[in-house]
Image (cartoon, rainbow, N blue to C red):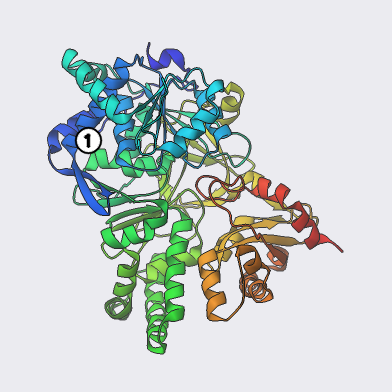
């Protein structure tokens, strides 16, 4: 059964996008793995040592998984889910599923059992890959509700040696099944791949669900092929290296860490764990870096903390270096050419100060840096540019992929750049950003009404409010549903203040409140590591995170940050009162999405008591 027979496209589009003569990702994968052979494709740590795997290894494992799934009865168009942190097995399974005509559904490893069950039910998943015992338990918790899942394949069998379950097997067993099936069916995978079409469904990507349950976006092969063009003006090559650490369920990480490397030959390096990312950056010094604003903020916070502990000479050198190179950075932002003095000052600052900072962060070899998935502070972008690290902003959504990028030769601070080739942008009468291109998603699985609301006359309604200047540069104002209208009728964009506040090393996240209220207030989540360090260096006693948030000195510290930022905003946009969220949140908590963004509506409801206290007469 073909994928298009099982899932109906909302666009009816079968336009192909070719990369090296290939119109699907499996075809490109077979071509490139055959060409590259024993060149290194990826690295992963094993017992603390980086191990290398070639393109031939990549191809062999993907084939074994594809053949193993066929031996278990997979039909073209069946959904196969992957529930794991990033690892080599994730990408082996990903390509293996596509090679045999399956549809890949990445499940966030931070999902709770009920969220896992919902996703597997909604997608009608037949086969499930899980990372380890912890992820397997989430499936077992809801097993009775998931009769459609026929087999569960486990990457890491540690702790499961005594398990007896008809549906559960280690991945090594699947590899063996695949090898046997391949010997008996030579050339079958190549035949399946050759019959693949651009409009075949490749992925189901469930949105992270800032409101309500996630929606399954149906992503065709043409979408993946088109996204290999997003680095317009920047050549990614097999000499480049990328650190993969954001969830591969997320469309941006998938594009940067799976699609682009298959096309370019860039080496993938898997972070050892979410907790070791900073150390992994230092060890590897990747040349190609994609990160969400939260990560760029953490890098800045590390430097701020290091400077707070530096000697007087170190602190002074850093301040002078940033000040000396800021003139060059601002001219670049304004589209001007820095003069010779600006260049000389930057070169000296880089030689004496910035080079060490880049080595500390693991960015000393970086030639391409990109930020996406959420708005980023202009102040943060200027700081990185002063260090000689220009960050490309990319804008997009699951439904359309990456559709705009800033260009190094046409920096426009406050914008996310211009549309890439074949992408059309326009604004609705309400200022909503509408996007259209021939390779976008095919609609939401099982939700025709939501699909019709989102795709109108081929235009995808993004839900974002923005502006397009005379040069075609797109500026994101905010989400439509997040715009605040105060009791006085003033329209306020909360993300502007929130992003500036998150530039503070002491603030992890923030939510501005004030819809239909007389003034604005704010809920703040502090940066645990930096605020703890501040408390220790200033002899402020605390026992745990909650008591840390309750210390008057810490409240005053955040208050001073807010007062400083208030000076940059008009009276109606200023924060009059704030409260600290005194619970340490992780991606497993319902307040946060898997990509670590606070859910505005959920936070507003859960912490309603704190909010009302700020408006109490």
Q: Which residue is at 29% across, 80% downward?
A: 352
User: Residue 510's image quarter?
Assistant: bottom right
Is 532 on the left-hand or right-hand side of 308? right
User: Residue 55's image quarter?
Assistant: top left
Res. 573 in view: yes
Q: Residue furthest top?
A: 1
List the residue tagged with mark 1: 58
Q: Which residue is at 60% across, 56% downward?
A: 495
Residue in front for this viewpoint, 560 or 22: 560
The percent position of residue 606, horizontal first and vertical second, equals 71, 49
Q: Which residue is at 36% across, 33% downward?
A: 161
Q: Residues within 10 Å of mark 1 (few under 14, many from 20)?
A: many
Q: Secondary structure at mark 1?
A: helix
User: Residue 509's image quarter?
Assistant: bottom right
The percent position of residue 359, horizontal first and vertical second, equals 30, 69
Q: Is residue 393 above or below residue 452?
A: below
Res. 23 in view: no
Quarter holding the N terminus is: top left
The percent position of residue 30, horizontal first and vertical second, equals 20, 29
Residue in front for this viewpoint, 522 or 594: 594
Is 193 on the left-hand or right-hand side of 565? left
Quarter holding the C terminus is: bottom right
């Amino acid at each position: 059964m073909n994928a298009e027979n099982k899932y109906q496209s909302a666009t009816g589009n079968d336009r192909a996008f070719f990369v090296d003569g290939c119109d699907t990702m499996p075809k490109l994968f077979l071509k490139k793995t055959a060409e590259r052979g024993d060149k290194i494709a990826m690295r992963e740590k094993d017992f603390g040592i980086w191990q290398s795997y070639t393109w031939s290894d990549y191809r062999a494992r993907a084939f074994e998984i594809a053949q193993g799934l066929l031996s278990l009865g997979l039909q073209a168009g069946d959904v196969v889910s992957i529930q794991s942190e990033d690892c080599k097995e994730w990408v082996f399974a990903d390509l293996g599923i596509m090679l045999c005509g399956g549809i890949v559904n990445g499940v966030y490893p931070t999902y709770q059992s009920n969220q896992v069950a919902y996703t597997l039910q909604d997608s009608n998943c037949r086969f499930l890959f899980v990372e380890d015992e912890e992820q397997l338990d989430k499936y077992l918790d809801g097993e009775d509700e998931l009769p459609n899942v026929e087999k569960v394949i486990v990457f890491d069998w540690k702790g499961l040696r005594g398990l007896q379950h008809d549906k559960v097997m280690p991945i090594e067993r699947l590899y063996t099944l695949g090898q046997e099936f391949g010997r008996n069916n030579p050339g079958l995978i190549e035949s399946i791949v050759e019959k693949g079409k651009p409009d075949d469904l490749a992925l189901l990507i469930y949105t992270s669900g800032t409101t309500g349950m996630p929606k399954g976006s149906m992503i065709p092969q043409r979408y993946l092929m088109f996204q290999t063009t997003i680095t317009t003006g920047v050549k990614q090559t097999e000499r480049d290296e990328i650190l993969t650490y954001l969830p591969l369920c997320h469309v941006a990480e998938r594009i940067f860490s799976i699609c682009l490397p298959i096309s370019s030959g860039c080496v993938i390096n898997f972070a050892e764990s979410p907790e070791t990312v900073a150390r992994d950056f230092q060890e590897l010094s990747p040349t190609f870096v994609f990160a969400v604003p939260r990560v760029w903020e953490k890098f800045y916070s590390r430097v701020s903390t290091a400077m707070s502990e530096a000697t007087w000479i170190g602190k002074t050198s850093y301040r002078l270096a940033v000040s000396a190179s800021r003139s060059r950075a601002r001219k670049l932002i304004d589209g001007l050419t820095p003069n010779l003095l600006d260049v000389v000052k930057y070169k000296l600052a880089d030689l004496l100060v910035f080079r060490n900072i880049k080595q500390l962060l693991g960015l000393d070899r970086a030639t391409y840096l990109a930020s996406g998935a959420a708005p980023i502070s202009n102040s943060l972008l200027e700081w990185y540019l002063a260090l000689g690290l220009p960050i490309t902003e990319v804008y997009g959504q699951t439904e359309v992929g990456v559709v705009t990028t800033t260009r190094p030769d046409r920096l426009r601070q406050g914008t996310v750049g211009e549309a890439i080739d074949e992408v059309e942008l326009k604004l609705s009468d309400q200022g909503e950003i509408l996007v259209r291109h021939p390779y976008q998603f095919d609609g939401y699985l099982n939700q025709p009404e939501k699909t019709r609301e989102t795709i109108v006359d081929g235009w995808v309604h993004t839900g974002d409010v923005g502006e397009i200047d005379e040069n075609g540069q797109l500026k994101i104002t905010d989400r439509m549903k997040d715009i605040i209208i105060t009791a006085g009728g003033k329209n306020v964009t909360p993300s502007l203040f929130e992003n500036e506040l998150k530039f503070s090393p002491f603030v992890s996240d923030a939510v501005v409140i004030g819809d239909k209220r007389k003034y604005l207030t704010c809920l703040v989540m502090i940066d645990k590591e930096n605020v703890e360090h501040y408390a220790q260096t200033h002899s402020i006693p605390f026992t745990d995170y909650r008591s840390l948030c309750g210390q008057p000195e810490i409240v005053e510290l955040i208050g001073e940050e807010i007062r400083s930022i208030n000076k940059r905003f008009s009276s109606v946009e200023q924060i009059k009162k704030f409260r600290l969220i005194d619970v340490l949140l992780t991606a497993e908590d319902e307040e946060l999405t898997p990509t670590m963004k606070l859910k505005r509506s959920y936070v507003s409801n859960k912490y309603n008591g704190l909010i009302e206290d700020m408006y109490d007469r």
